[in-house]
C-alpha cells in the first residue's frame, strides 16, 4: 500500500461504521490523502461486491496525493471506482447535484487540519517551522492569516483569539501583535505570543502559541461556518440506513456536531403538559454513538493527532425530512 503523509485517525472504527452502510456511493467530504477513503472502499467492495467513492477536498495538492493512493490501492479492481471534486466540504449539495447523485449510502467528515498542511512550512500552519502567515486550506479562501494578524483591529483580533482559540490571554496577545505590526512569519508570531503570555502560564499546556494558531486557522478558512452548513446537507443526503461519521478535533466543532445530531434524533417536541403528541415529530437519524468516542492510548502513542479526535456517528431513518426543516442551529443552508 502506498505511503501517505497523513495517518488516518480511528481508522478501524470509521471503516466498520461505513462498511455497514447500505449499497451505494459514499462520500469522503474531507478527502485529504485518501487514507480513510481507500480503506472504506476496500471494506465496502468486500461487503457489497462493488464500491464507489465521491471524494471532495478544497486543496489541489490533496487531490494529487489521493489520486496516487487510490490508483495504487484500487486501480486494478474494476469493482472499485471513484470521482474527485475540488470544492469545500460545505458545497456537498452542489457537488452531488452536479455529479448526478441523489442520496448516498455514507458520508465521512474528518474535520480540522491534517499533517500534510502542518508539515509544509510554506503553508504557514506550524508555529514550529518558519513560513509565511498563510494558513489557507485551499486557494479559494478569501484571506490569509497575515490579513487577519495585520489587518484586524485590536477588538476584532481579541474576539478571534478568545472565541475561536478559547485563549484566556487574548487581550495581551492582541496588544502585542498590534504593537509589532507588520508581522510576516509564523515563527515571528509564535515568539510574540510566547512573550505576551505570563511566564507561569507558559510552563504548562503545551506550546503557548497553539491556541492562537488554531484561532487564526479557523478564522481564515471559515471552518465553523462551514461545519454548520455541511451538517444539515449531510443528514438530508443520506439514504435510509445511510451513515454519517464525523471526526472533530476541538470542542467548538464537536459542539456543533452534537447539537445537529441531537436535533436530527429528537422525537416529540410538544410542551411537557400536552396529554398527547400533536407535533408528529419522529427522528430522522438514530445515534450510533451516544458519547464521543476517543482513540486508544495505543493509537495516540503512534499518532499524536489522534489524541484530540472525537468521533460521532448517526444512521438515517426512513422518516421524511419535515417540510419546515429540522435544525435549531440557524440557517440550514
Image (cartoon, rainbow, N blue to C red):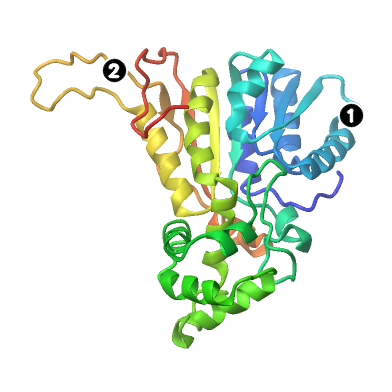
Rendering coords of residue 199 (x, y %): 48, 87
Rendering coords of residue 328 (x, y %): 33, 31
Residue highlighted by disc 1: 75
Position of residue 124 relative to residue 104, above or below, is below
Position of residue 236 relative to residue 121, above or below, is above
Question: Which residue appears at 48% of the width and 70% of the height?
Answer: 174
Question: Which residue appears at 87% of the width and 39% of the height?
Answer: 68
Disc number for residue 281: 2
Residue found farthest to the right: 76
The mark nearer the N terminus, 1 or 2, is 1
In this rendering, would 132 be left or right of 304?
Answer: right
Label 2 environment density (alpha carbons within 10 Å; few <14, some 14–19, many ≥20): some
Q: Which quarter of the figure has residue 188? A: bottom right
In this rendering, would 128 be left or right of 73?
Answer: left
In this rendering, would 2 be left or right of 110?
Answer: right
Label 1 environment density (alpha carbons within 10 Å; few <14, some 14–19, many ≥20): some
Rendering coords of residue 70 (x, y %): 83, 35
In this rendering, would 87 be left or right of 120?
Answer: left
Q: Which quarter of the figure has residue 245? A: top right
In the depicted view, which residue is nearer to us: 58 or 104?
58
Amino acid at each position: 500500500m502506498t505511503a501517505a503523509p497523513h495517518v488516518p485517525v480511528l481508522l478501524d472504527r470509521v471503516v466498520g461504521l461505513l462498511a455497514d452502510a447500505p449499497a451505494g456511493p459514499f462520500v469522503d467530504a474531507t478527502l485529504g490523502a485518501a487514507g480513510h477513503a481507500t480503506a472504506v472502499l476496500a471494506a465496502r467492495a468486500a461487503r457489497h461486491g462493488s464500491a464507489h467513492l465521491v471524494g471532495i477536498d478544497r486543496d489541489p495538492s490533496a487531490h494529487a496525493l489521493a489520486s496516487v493512493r487510490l490508483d495504487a490501492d484500487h486501480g486494478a479492481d474494476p469493482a472499485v471506482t471513484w470521482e474527485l471534486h475540488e470544492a469545500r466540504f460545505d458545497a456537498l449539495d452542489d457537488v452531488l447535484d452536479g455529479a448526478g447523485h441523489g442520496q448516498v449510502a455514507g458520508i465521512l467528515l474528518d474535520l480540522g487540519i491534517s499533517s500534510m498542511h502542518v508539515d509544509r512550512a510554506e503553508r504557514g500552519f506550524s508555529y514550529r517551522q518558519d513560513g509565511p502567515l498563510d494558513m489557507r486550506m485551499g486557494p479559494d479562501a478569501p484571506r490569509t492569516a497575515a490579513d487577519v494578524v495585520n489587518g484586524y483591529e485590536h477588538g476584532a483580533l481579541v474576539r478571534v483569539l478568545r472565541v475561536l482559540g478559547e485563549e484566556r490571554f487574548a487581550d495581551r496577545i492582541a496588544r502585542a501583535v498590534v504593537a509589532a505590526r507588520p508581522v510576516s512569519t509564523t515563527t515571528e508570531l509564535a515568539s510574540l505570543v510566547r512573550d505576551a503570555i505570563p511566564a507561569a502560564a507558559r510552563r504548562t499546556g503545551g506550546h503557548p502559541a497553539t491556541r492562537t494558531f488554531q484561532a487564526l486557522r479557523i478564522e481564515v478558512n471559515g471552518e465553523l461556518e462551514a461545519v454548520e452548513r455541511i451538517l444539515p446537507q449531510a443528514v438530508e443526503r443520506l439514504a435510509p440506513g445511510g451513515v454519517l461519521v464525523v471526526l472533530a478535533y476541538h470542542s467548538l466543532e464537536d459542539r456543533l456536531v452534537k447539537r445537529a445530531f441531537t436535533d436530527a434524533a429528537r422525537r416529540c417536541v410538544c410542551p411537557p403538559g400536552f396529554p398527547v403528541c400533536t407535533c408528529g415529530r419522529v427522528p430522522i437519524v438514530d445515534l450510533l454513538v451516544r458519547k464521543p468516542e476517543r482513540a486508544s492510548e495505543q493509537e495516540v502513542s503512534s499518532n499524536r493527532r489522534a489524541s484530540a479526535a472525537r468521533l460521532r456517528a448517526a444512521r438515517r431513518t426512513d422518516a421524511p425530512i419535515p417540510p419546515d426543516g429540522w435544525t435549531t442551529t440557524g440557517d440550514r443552508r
